[in-house]
Amino acid sequence: MSVALYRRYRPERFGDLIGQDVVARTLLNEVRAGTLAHAYLFAGTRGTGKTSTARILARAVNCLAPEDGEPCNSCAACIEILSGASVDVLEIDAASNRGIDEMRDLRDKVKYLPASLRRKAYIIDEAHMLTPEAWNAFLKTLEEPPGHVFFVLATTEPHKVPDTVRSRVQRFDFRRIRTDAIARHLATVAGREDLKVDAEALQLIARAAQGSVRDALSLLDQAASGGDSPLTLVAARRALGLTDPGLLHELMRTLAGADAAGVLRTAARAFEAGADPRQLLRDVSRLARAAELAALGYAEGAEVSPEEAALAADVAAVAPQGFWLTALDLFAAAEMNLRQPVDARLQVELCLLRLVRPPAAAAPEDAVAALEARVAALERGAVSTPPGAAQAGTPANATPVPQATPSAESGNGAQAAPPPAPAAAVHGLDTVERWRDEWPMLIEAVTRSDTMLAGVLRDCRPLEASPGKLVIGAKGGFHFERISDPHKAAVLATAAASVAGHDVSVESRFIGEPRPEQEAPAGTLSDVTQAVLQTFAGSRVTGTRAREEGSGPAPGARRDA
């Protein structure tokens, strides 16, 4: 059975690392000077060389005939490590060995001296997967290991590694590899493998790898397996399942021209040709980014082919200002929706249609009148309502959109025109079932204003609904606190109104199990307490006590003479 290209062409020396010059130079100097740290944290995206660097470091430390800090890869120690037969260099997958028992076992074994090498090396991959209990059991050993041991922790999510661990290790960040550097490496590998590959195909594969050398070699292996020699740009695109460039360019032009029928027609042709909806969305997003950069005068930052750069410049000149920025926002929201079990093609088509056919705007004079009425209502509410106090008859966690009120008669007896009535509901969202169907659209609308709130909303659900009201249920205390926050609730109300086509008041309700020590879910404070917290920003409630009868006026109360 053949060995994959990414396994055959792993870097074996610090000088072989691609795009990680700072990391390689620093580690090489430490090996030369004999100032090796007791623990390292290698952080970076997949395929950037973290595990390969850890293996090189283990060989360099134990090499019997080092060459200016580099491992010779020919002595007994290097050969033993390269073959994977060394019992002194252990690679641990934290994703499958993440518990406290595994860490206790490791803690017991580190005290034993190496069997044949100078120093023992423990390489813990995906270290962020360890449980908090495992980290606690491992922390003391990591801080003060025996002199014959050093650790290398590799992770793609360093923010999940506890601060107490990050403060005890040397951290190296592995950057994404530049596209041109990956293309040069692919050309070298293709030459060694006697593969005939066009330069355009290598550039395409390098861009598709998104900064990962391992992904690039895997894609080259996949494309070369098609049997095309030489491997052309068309053959590489077909082998990788990428969207046909002609259809992609046509789709971009129809988007820029706001041709809704043309957009759907072109997208349908792409799907019929075998394009994956998610890949099509990624391809369109990449070109939309290039178009926005071209509009901003920074076309060289797009990293696209010359043909795609010319297309981006054309559509940037045709589309109105800010069009492609809006497109990127919609595409990002659609990509989040595609992570759910939904109809991928339908989601992509809806996203494209929302871009070329945004919701119909009201007439300018109606919009101005409605805005003036809303401002007047807000000003009256600000004057008559003390900070933090809820309006009578309105729940504290409800955020109705202010309604326009008729203006008073003017001095000459003429009455101002009444503000326009709310627009008729576009979707008829008056039932829980209809809101459940439109939940992805509500999440998308919230994403435009608050991405974190949209993530919270994914774990909530509609409980009650009427033409002007929506009650959202949250099982978790954290989720309830977020959606019941007045500012967050205002965002939800605005998003719900944009989806429903009319004003909607949004209320939140806790539907989970309250904590044993609490009588009510977190966040249900009295109106007085909420007013105090809003008046004294940054304060927190440590306890409340009712004033006893006859104990005198409350602090700060006015005494009548």
Image (spheres, rainbow, N blue to C red):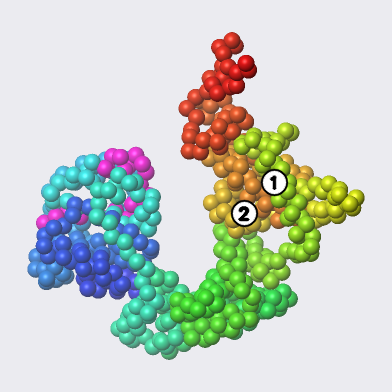
Range of residues picked out in magenta: 118-139
Q: Is residue 292 visible?
A: yes
Question: Which of the 4 image quarters holds residue 279?
Answer: bottom right
In this view, the residue in front, 250 or 126, is: 250
Task: Kindly state the secondary structure of the residue where label 2 is placed.
Answer: helix
On the image, the x and y values in percent for residue 375 come to: 71, 50
Pick the quarter of the image with the N terminus.
Answer: bottom left
Residue 10 within the segment the image draws in magenta: no
In this view, the residue in front, 77 or 43, is: 43
Disc 2 residue type (three-letter): Val
Question: Which of the 4 image quarters holds residue 28?
Answer: bottom left
Mark 1 near mark 2, Cβ–Cβ under 8 Å? no
On the image, the x and y values in percent for residue 176 come to: 37, 68
Residue 134 within the segment the image draws in magenta: yes
Image vertical order of residue 384 relative to residue 159, above or below: above
On the image, the x and y values in percent for residue 74 come to: 14, 71
Q: Residue at x 26, y 71 (%)?
A: 21
Task: Kindly state the secondary structure of the residue where label 1 is placed.
Answer: helix
Disc 1 residue type (three-letter): Leu
Report the disc number at residue 378.
1
Pick the quarter of the image with the C terminus.
Answer: top right
How packed mark 2 is, by other alpha carbons closer than 10 Å (few <14, some 14-19, many 20 or more), is: many
In this view, the residue in front, 313 or 406, is: 406
Q: What residue did someone put label 2 on? A: 446
Q: Is residue 8 visible?
A: no
Image vertical order of residue 403 relative to residue 313, above or below: above
